[in-house]
Amino acid sequence: MTDLPFRIGQALDVHAFAAPDSPRPLMVACLEWPGERPLEGHSDADVAAHALCDAMLLATGLGELGSVFGVDRPEWAGASGRALLGEVRRMTAEAGWVLGNATVQVVGNRPRMAARLSEACRVMSETAGGTVTVSATTSDRLGFTGRGEGVAALACALMVRAG
């Protein structure tokens, strides 16, 4: 099989909302959302960053989120999505890949992301090392996101051979 100069990865990440009295902040798309109920997870549960990390890892054949940053890796407990994304950028670059571009769609009723989408795109692009477009939608009251039980994110990443 010929190794192409580009590869595409896609991924889905989901997290349930934490208990209402959880002291952790809500992190989505490498941004903190003050006053919002946080998500539960081994790290900061940033579904957007996690989905993008997974898509980049899968495209380059370096594994997947659970094998690279799984719960059996205590050094990543509580890590920010930004830190995970930075590490994936380092890993993929070391393997000879750079992010061409990516899309990330957050699915949930909360947080209301429209006013901060350009900020999310900027921060995720800077961290991932390529253009990342972030969007948000609801599921029209269907499923766990529609019932307000959690948030999901889907990502697609185009990885390009460096050099």
Image (cartoon, rainbow, N blue to C red):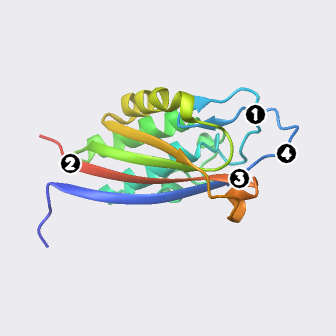
CA separation in Å, label 4 and label 2: 41 Å
Q: CA distance from mark 1 to mark 2?
A: 36 Å
Q: Is residue 72 above or below residue 19?
A: below
Residue positioned most to the front: 140
Label 1: which secondary element = loop
Count every numbered label the image shows and give the total.
4
> Which residue is labeled 3 in the image?
150
The answer for how far apart the CA atoms under marks 4 and 1 are is 10 Å
Q: Callout 3, which amino acid? A: Gly
Tag nearer the camera, 3 or 2: 3
Residue 63 visible at all: no
Please tell me which residue is depicted at 68% across the width and 56% down the height of the picture: 145
Q: Residues within 10 Å of mark 3 (few under 14, many from 20)?
A: many
The CA distance from mark 3 to mark 2 is: 33 Å
Identify the amino acid type marked 2: Val
**Residue 151 drawn at (x, y percent):** 65, 51
The residue pinned by badge 1 equals 24
Disc 1 or 3, which lies upstream in sequence? 1
Distance from Cα at disc 1 to Cα at disc 3: 15 Å
* N-term-proximal mark, 1 vs 2: 1
Q: Residue at 44% across / 52% down in the picture?
A: 155
Quadrant the C terminus occupies: top left
- Work out whether residue 107 or residue 62 is closer to the camera in this orientation and state it: 107
Measuring from the top left, give residue 22's x and y in whole percent: 83, 38
Q: Residue at x 54, y 28 (%)?
A: 116
For mark 2, give the secondary structure.
strand
Q: Is residue 23 left or right of residue 15?
A: right
Of residues 153 and 22, the one nearer the viewer is 153
Q: Residue 109's spot in the image, x, y percent?
A: 68, 47
Give, as a three-letter code, the residue at label 4: Ala
The disc placed on residue 160 is 2
